Amino acid sequence: MTVMNEAYDLAMESIKCMNSEVKQKLSEIVSWKSKLGAIKSSEKLKLDTEKKKVLNQDNLLKDEVNKLTRKLLNELDQKHSELMKLVNHEENKSEKLLQDLELRNNIISKAVTSNNAIQVFRTYKEEKIAEEMKALQIITKFKKLPEFLPGNIQSFELLYGKLHEHEDKYTDMFNKFEFKVIQQYKTDLPIVEDLVCCNDGFIWISFTNGKVVQKISFSKGSTFTLQAYEVSPLSIALLPSGDLLISSMESYLNILSKSTDTITESKYRVAPLQTVAVHVTKTNQIIVGAREKGPPFPVNGPRQVIIMNMQGKKKKRYHLENKGNPIFSQPRSITTDGDNNIYVLDLLSIDKWQGRIVALSNSNGVKWTYDGNQMANKEQLFAPFSFVTTPLNNIVVADNNHMLHILNQTGECIHFLHTKEFDIHWPRSLDIDKSGTLYIGCKIYNKWNPWEAKIHAVQFSGF
């Protein structure tokens, strides 16, 4: 019996290993198929984009060729007109000279045949004076019209442009996926609901129900609070000046001044709505999520995403899609990538925090939505809490089901991972610092340490 038990245990251990290997291979093939689908979508977009660029160049060169053609024709007309004016002037002058010469010829001929000395001397005297007064002046040189020399049609391709073969664009996509936790830090908060990296190496974190925003540094596995402010921070974002914008569900954004350490009302306003999300783009635009006052659900008013410039002037508003239907339920978070694409984390319900990712188009509509991955979310709803874009313009989404989803620019999931495998529980906030390190703020999972939510520093590549 003992031998049987040992054999059973060995078999079970082998089966568990096999099961783990099969799951790993299943995950890899799903990821591979997603990447292939991503290539198809990406290349279709690329095809449309490059065709549009060729046609734009075609129209541009047609316009420039037409302008140059009109310019050359006008120059020819002008030079021809100037030449003809000069020729006509000389022609008129020649005609008058001809008439004068014919008259003088008649007078001289009469004097020659008259045999009258007085007439001969008078004619000689008159003609001598006339000859001195009217010296024959005829222009014998005229500048010809310029000749058109056609350009070298063989070099036209250099002007028009040509197709350039890039090196393998998808090298990074097929590189080995790397996700390595290099450090973890304890905070004195139960949840790190928002996290923003500063250029000076410090980090802003927030906890809404605790009405606190902290500026922290890291030291020996823990965080050290440099500054703390009492405010209701639903969402935070950093301005280029180093000032911190805070959405506190007011009709305006608050601003925490770096120089004075005071919180005041900013010029970024959405009245009569209230702010629920804020993001600052790399091109220094302020993007605000806004909704009507009152509870988030049911929806009883406009839910909008508003783009402002640094002066607070509204430049664009996303509200209704092309068919007139509302785009958003609750624009909970906003981010942008290196190509200035705008992504919105849209909360659909607060029962199980179900949500989706919405990519906005330039025409006030929606390019695509992501509602979760069939493999990753087959047992639970997709519950996104935060997201961030990577230097490769992929989107990392923190799912409340202990997961991270990695999407490409076309909304396809190219990879997903279970954060528990890396000892990361309840990921709630994400940001990437200037060195490329991913920081993940979490919710506490150990009831014995209710005020020690962790922040994980992650080294990553391949996405």
Image (cartoon, rainbow, N blue to C red):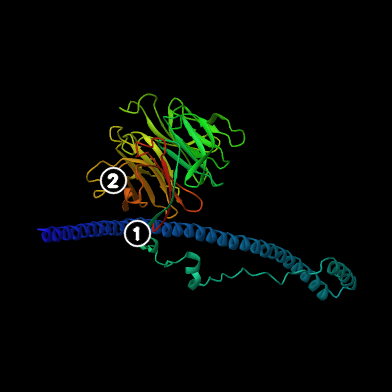
Image-quadrant location for residue 87: bottom right
Image quarter of the N terminus: bottom left
Q: Is residue 340 left or right of residue 300?
A: right
Which is more toward the observer, 315 or 447? 447
Of 310 and 145, the residue lying toward us? 310
| Residue located 57% across and 62% down the image | 72
In the figure, is residue 68 to the left or right of 130?
A: left
Which residue shows up at 53% across the image and 58% down it?
A: 67
Q: Is residue 88 above or below residue 270?
A: below
**Tag 1, which secondary structure?**
helix
Q: Rate crowding at label 1 as few (under 14), some (14 to 19) or many (20 or more) other CA atoms within 10 Å.
A: few
Secondary structure beneath dot 2 equals loop
Residue carrying label 2:
372
Which kind of residue does numbered mark 2 sit on? Gly
Q: Quadrant of the C terminus?
A: bottom left
Q: Classify residue 162 by image quadrant.
A: bottom left
Q: Is residue 7 above or below residue 120?
A: above
Residue 164 placement, left or right of 79: left
Residue in the foreground of this view, choosing between 15 and 107: 15
Q: CA distance from mark 1 to mark 2?
A: 23 Å
Q: Which mark is residue 263?
A: none
Q: Is residue 337 visible?
A: no
Q: Residue 113: horizontal and vertical position, in percent?
A: 81, 75
Name the residue type under label 1: Glu
Tell me which corner region of the image, top left, top right, bottom left or bottom right, holds residue 371. top left
Residue 380 seen: yes
Of the numbered discs 1 and 2, the one sitting upstream in the chain is: 1
42 is higher (above) or lower (below) than 269 = below
The circle drawn on residue 43 is 1
